[in-house]
């Protein structure tokens, strides 16, 4: 194997370093390949594996199985982070990609509920949990491995390559789904063709394992092991001693929390806002997001390299500050460009909800299993889903909705049978739909009125902000912690930040919109978190770009 010079002056990337980056980045490809795959096929998976439930409950449990992978990631960070600091980076993240890849592949082979009954959903959820655990150790291993191979003045540039591969994973899954769906036809795809994208992942797994087996251990870990300074208790050292724990907390609150909400806000919440709030059709919205990602992805490398020159803090915190200052005007401009009829209706037609405050709850529902049955809650859910701005006025009795001069009575769902509830819900939804349509609220975005260039430009700006906060994050986290407990220390804040702060963004944002009655109110969550990260990071987080990452203590 070619030798790698530690902390060398700037020089061209060697063949060995390219191999290190490529092999490490394949885990991120896998992560986002599976993420988009499972999310896109959730409706089919619900029918195949949760057929014993009614359709609504089946879809909820399919999403729960999806969410399970996120919930357990911090625990995977603890498990595999500990192993990475004790036995080495290479072997640990070889294990994590094997678990990730096999979990994805086995979903393609798993018999349906019709074939093996309740064992099917149980095995599916177990596979999702295994994959979530492996993912908890994958990113920390990849980032640590690449950074510990990189020259000191190029750690930001080298590790930023890992971030670009998320886009590749998304595009791979999208292309394979579209290709199989088109080639087989809708009926065959729904019957058995949906398994093909999961089964195809075995090729990616084979390449990943083959390349990783050819790699040597991280030079920093080798040096530490030769000196007999590996940690015997990484968890205790990382989280049981204040000297390191304070940096774990600072990494979460002063770096990753802001990075996570900007990452999810600029891509996934933007897509959610386009389709659910602005009523843009799914294909058009995905094309816009895809184009924005294509244009914006090279900026991961730009900002990673820039952080090698001016520091990690200025780049990441500037991204957080820009997001906090621009999200509200950018999303308002997105409404005017993507659905001008909706923007006009919001401005000219007031909607009022008259309800008993005691009946109104905060509709935070991360698992999708809570049932909101009071008349106030039912009205808020329907108005929020209809992209209507509304104000709430205190009243008594069953809630009423006023659209201009029209008054729409709602209903109290407490004590109703599921069938009766569904019937009244459908009737109310139809009544509200007719009223807001008459008031000028469009049922969907009109493509002929859409300013496509402005929509794309706004989405590109949001993605570039994502690249500012995410491009340098791996180098910053690696440099913040000593070699002996680096894998453990950086993995936990990264996965709490991205799995919980970021992953819950759409749920929290929708609850805020329903609570307040303004379609933009959900943006306050990423704005406040990004602003808090800017302040905490600015005043309390040290700059790390010139640190010696081969120091053990």
Image (cartoon, rainbow, N blue to C red):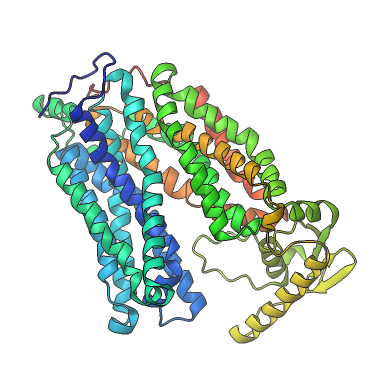
Q: Is residue 439 left or right of residue 332?
A: right
Q: Nearer the viewer, residue 287 or 430?
A: 287
Q: Is residue 245 visible?
A: no
Q: Is residue 228 above or below residue 363?
A: above
Residue 476 location in percent, x, y? 38, 28
Who's the residue at 57% across and 36% down the image? 461
When asked about the image quadrant of residue 250, the answer is top left
Q: Is residue 87 above or below residue 50?
A: above
Residue 52 location in percent, x, y? 41, 83
Q: Is residue 335 left or right of residue 390?
A: left
Who's the residue at 9% across and 26% down the image? 226
Q: Nearer the viewer, residue 462 or 230?
A: 462
Who's the residue at 41% across and 80% down the image? 51
Q: Quadrant of the C terminus?
A: top left
Q: Is residue 343 left or right of residue 29?
A: right
Q: Is residue 323 left or right of residue 445?
A: left
Q: Nearer the viewer, residue 15 or 163?
A: 15
Residue 161 location in percent, x, y? 34, 34
Q: Is residue 289 above or below residue 3?
A: below
When asked about the image quadrant of residue 3, the answer is top left
């Amino acid at each position: 194997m070619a030798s790698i010079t530690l902390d060398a002056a700037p020089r061209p990337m060697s063949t060995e370093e390219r191999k290190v980056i490529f092999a490490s980045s394949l885990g991120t490809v896998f992560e986002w390949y599976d993420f988009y795959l499972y999310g896109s096929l959730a409706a089919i998976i619900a029918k195949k594996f949760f057929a014993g439930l009614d359709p609504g409950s089946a879809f909820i449990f399919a999403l729960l199985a999806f969410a399970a992978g996120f919930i357990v990631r911090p625990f995977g960070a603890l498990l595999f982070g500990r192993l990475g600091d004790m036995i080495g980076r290479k072997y640990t993240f070889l294990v994590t990609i094997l678990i990730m890849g096999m979990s994805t592949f086995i979903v393609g082979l798993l018999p349906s509920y019709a074939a093996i009954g309740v064992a099917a959903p149980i095995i599916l959820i177990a596979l999702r949990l295994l994959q979530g655990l492996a993912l908890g150790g994958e990113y920390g291993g990849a980032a640590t491995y690449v950074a510990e191979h990189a020259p000191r003045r190029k750690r930001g540039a080298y590790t930023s390559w890992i971030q670009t591969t998320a886009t590749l994973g998304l595009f791979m899954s999208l292309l394979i789904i579209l290709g199989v769906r088109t080639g087989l036809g809708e009926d065959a795809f729904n019957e058995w063709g949906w398994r093909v994208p999961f089964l195809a992942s075995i090729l990616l797994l084979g390449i990943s394992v083959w390349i990783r087996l050819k790699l040597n251990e991280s030079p920093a870990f080798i040096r530490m092991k030769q000196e007999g300074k590996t940690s015997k208790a990484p968890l205790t050292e990382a989280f049981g001693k204040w000297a390191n724990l304070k940096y774990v907390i600072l990494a979460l609150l002063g770096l990753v929390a802001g990075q996570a909400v900007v990452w999810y806000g600029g891509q996934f919440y933007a897509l959610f806002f386009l389709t659910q709030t602005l009523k843009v059709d799914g294909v058009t919205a995905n094309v816009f997001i895809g184009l924005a990602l294509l244009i914006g992805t090279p900026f991961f490398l730009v900002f990673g390299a820039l952080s090698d020159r001016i520091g990690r803090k200025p780049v990441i915190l500037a991204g957080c500050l820009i997001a906090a200052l621009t999200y509200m005007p950018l999303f308002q401009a997105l409404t005017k460009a993507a659905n001008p009829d909706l923007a006009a209706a919001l401005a000219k037609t007031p909607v009022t909800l008259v309800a008993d405050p005691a009946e109104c709850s905060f509709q935070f529902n991360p698992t999708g299993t809570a049932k909101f049955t009071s008349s106030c809650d039912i009205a808020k859910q329907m108005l929020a889903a209809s992209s209507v701005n509304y104000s709430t006025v205190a009243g008594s009795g069953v809630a009423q909705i006023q659209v201009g001069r029209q008054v729409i009575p709602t209903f109290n769902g407490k004590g109703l049978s599921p069938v009766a509830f569904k019937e009244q819900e459908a009737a109310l939804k139809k009544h509200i739909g007719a009223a807001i349509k008459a008031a000028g609220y469009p049922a969907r975005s009109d493509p002929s009125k859409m300013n496509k260039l402005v929509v794309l430009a706004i989405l590109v700006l949001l993605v570039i902000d994502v690249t500012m906060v995410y491009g340098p994050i791996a180098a910053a986290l690696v440099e913040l912690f000593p070699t002996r407990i680096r894998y453990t220390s950086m993995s936990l804040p990264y996965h709490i930040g991205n799995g919980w702060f970021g992953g819950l963004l759409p749920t929290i944002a929708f609850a805020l919109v329903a609570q307040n009655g303004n379609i933009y109110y959900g943006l306050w969550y990423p704005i406040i978190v990004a602003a808090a990260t800017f302040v905490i990071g600015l005043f309390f987080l040290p700059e790390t770009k010139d640190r010696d990452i081969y120091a053990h203590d």
